[in-house]
Structures are given as structure tokens and as C-alpha cells.
Image: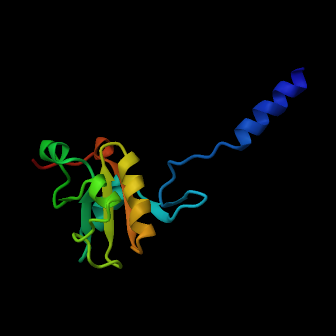
Amino acid sequence: MKYIYMVVVLVLLSGCQSTADNNEMNQEEDGPMYTKISPEEALNKMNEEGVIIIDVREASEYAEGHVEGAQLLPLGDVKSGNLDLIPDKDQLILVYCRSGNRSGQAAKILVANGYTNVLDFGGILDWPYEVVK
């Protein structure tokens, strides 16, 4: 019985994988790939020419405080294909939300729609820098 327990624990541990690594490529088995980056890396990218920062939260959340320069494009709009805000599919796109869940969903959808340079920096809850209202 002791050996069975050890085998089960080892199997479970071998299946665990950290998702907090910077520059991690995220891919669902049938989903598109995008890159997850840290807030620090996102801040550095924000100084590049042609970058667009997308906040996929709702308007009320955006009004409470958002990353400077971010444009509001709620996840519902992304899901419905309302992507007129981002006409250049090769443009550098930085996506975030509140906690990182919606930004991951949006990043997958954008890549599935042919966007080639999508970076997800998670949620504003982890944003250590100032926000604007």
C-alpha cells in the first residue's frame, strides 16, 4: 500500500508544471499560442513604437483605473470578433485584464484570428506601477 501511495504521488507531481515562467509560450491542446510576459517586460515593451495596449475588462473596471495608454476592448467584443481597434495583425499587442484570466482568453482569440505578435501580461492586480483614471 505504501508503494502505491508513492507511485500516485510521483505521477501527480510529474504532471505538475509551473505556469509562472516569464516568456512562457501558452498553448491549449487545440488552441493557439501566445506569449505570457511579466509586468516589467510589458512596461519595457510599452516604449516601443507601434505597440497597442489592450484592456479587456469591462468599461466600469477600466474607469476605476487602467494602465496608461491602454485602450478598452472588452473580452465580449473580442469574442464577437469586433477587432476594428486593431487593424494591423502584425502590430505588437499587449493584453491585460484584472487577474489574467480574461487576458489569456483574449490572447488566444487574437492569435486564432491571425494576430502574430500578442503578449499577455496578466492582470492589473499584479501591475506594480501607477494606473490612470
Q: Quadrant of residue 28?
A: bottom right
21 to the left or right of 4: left
Which residue is pictured at 31% across the width and 76% down the height? 91
Residue 9 in percent (x, y) is at: 76, 31
Residue 130 in percent (x, y) is at: 18, 48
**Outermost top residue:** 1
20 to the left or right of 2: left
On screen, residue 22 above or below 12: below
Q: Quadrant of residue 8?
A: top right
Residue 133 in percent (x, y) is at: 9, 47
Of 28 and 92, the residue lying toward us: 28
Q: Is residue 56 in view?
A: yes
On screen, residue 85 above or below 61: below
Which residue is pictured at 71% across the width and 38% down the height? 13
Which residue is pictured at 51% across the width and 65% down the height? 32
29 to the left or right of 88: right
Residue 11 in percent (x, y) is at: 77, 38
Numbered circles on residues, count:
0
What colour scheme governs how the chains and residues are painted in the rendered image of this protein?
rainbow
Which residue is pictured at 41% across the width and 53% down the height? 104
Quarter of the image that includes the N terminus = top right
**Outermost front residue:** 80
Q: Is residue 38 in view?
A: no
Of 90 and 49, the residue lying toward us: 90
On screen, residue 93 above or below 66: below
